[in-house]
Image (cartoon, rainbow, N blue to C red):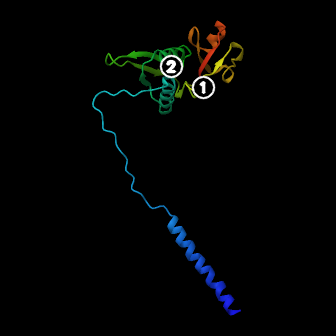
Amino acid sequence: MLTAGVNYVVAPKLICAILACVVFALGKPHKLAIYLELPKLVGNITHMINDHISDMFTRLSNAYAVGKKTVDMPFTKMCEAVAGVMLEEKYLRKVELVSPDKTHSTLRLTLSYRGSTPAVSHIRRISKPGVRIYRSLREFKPILSGLGISILSTSSGIMSDRQARIAHLGGEVLAELW
């Protein structure tokens, strides 16, 4: 009886010792991380942007969030057309093309504020390069009961949902903003 009790007391100590060794053996050793650094290229480097409209909306949202007056972005005809619609709907104060050099044009947008609050509180990208969203004239619904707009790409160009209803056109929904 006494021997069985000793075996019972000794056995957990052996198991604990074995488990402690297993934990030590399975623990991950610290490795030295080596990160390769790209050499800094000389000259004027342009970064490739795949989705210019999303980049434009991100820049606008960030600028409105910090209270900036203007935003500069790379010029594309599509961004200029979207900015033109935002200008017509009074979400922007001014749109101008700035060319510091002949190779790269810049689009400068002057933001609109109503008092101290931004004219745009939310911008939501609907149709993306991977998933295109199209709506017919019957599928248009007012954004925030008419307080916001949808920006569409139609066969007649870039326009707001109000202009598309008047022209009886459907198209690709680029974004909604309010």
- What is the crowding at mark 2: few (fewer than 14 residues within 10 Å), some, or many (at least 20)? many
Q: Position of residue 131 (x, y in %)?
A: 60, 25
The front one of 112 and 43 is 43
Name the residue type under label 2. Answer: Leu
* Vertical position of residue 94 compared to residue 34: above or below: above
Instruction: Locate the C terminus and report the quarter of the image it occupies.
Output: top right
- Tell me what residue is drawn at x 30 percent, y 38 percent: 39
Report the Cα–Cα distance between label 1 and label 2: 27 Å
Answer yes or no: is residue 177 visible: no
Q: Give the SS element for disc 1.
A: loop
Q: Position of residue 141 (x, y in %)?
A: 69, 19
Q: Position of residue 135 (x, y in %)?
A: 66, 17
The front one of 84 and 23 is 23
Name the residue type under label 1. Answer: Val
Q: Give the SS element for disc 2.
A: strand
In the displayed structure image, the side of residue 173 where residue 61 appears, left or right: left
- Residue picked out by circle 1: 131
The front one of 8 and 172 is 8
Quadrant in which residue 146 is drawn: top right
In the displayed structure image, the side of residue 124 where residue 66 appears, left or right: left
* Residue 50 marker: none
* Vertical position of residue 33 compared to residue 108: above or below: below
In the displayed structure image, the side of residue 104 where residue 1 appears, left or right: right
- Residue found farthest to the left: 42
Instruction: Locate the N terminus and report the quarter of the image it occupies.
Output: bottom right
Q: Earlier in the sequence, mark 1 or mark 2?
A: 2
Q: Position of residue 73 (x, y in %)?
A: 42, 23
- Residue picked out by circle 2: 92
The front one of 28 and 170 is 28
- What is the crowding at mark 1: few (fewer than 14 residues within 10 Å), some, or many (at least 20)? few
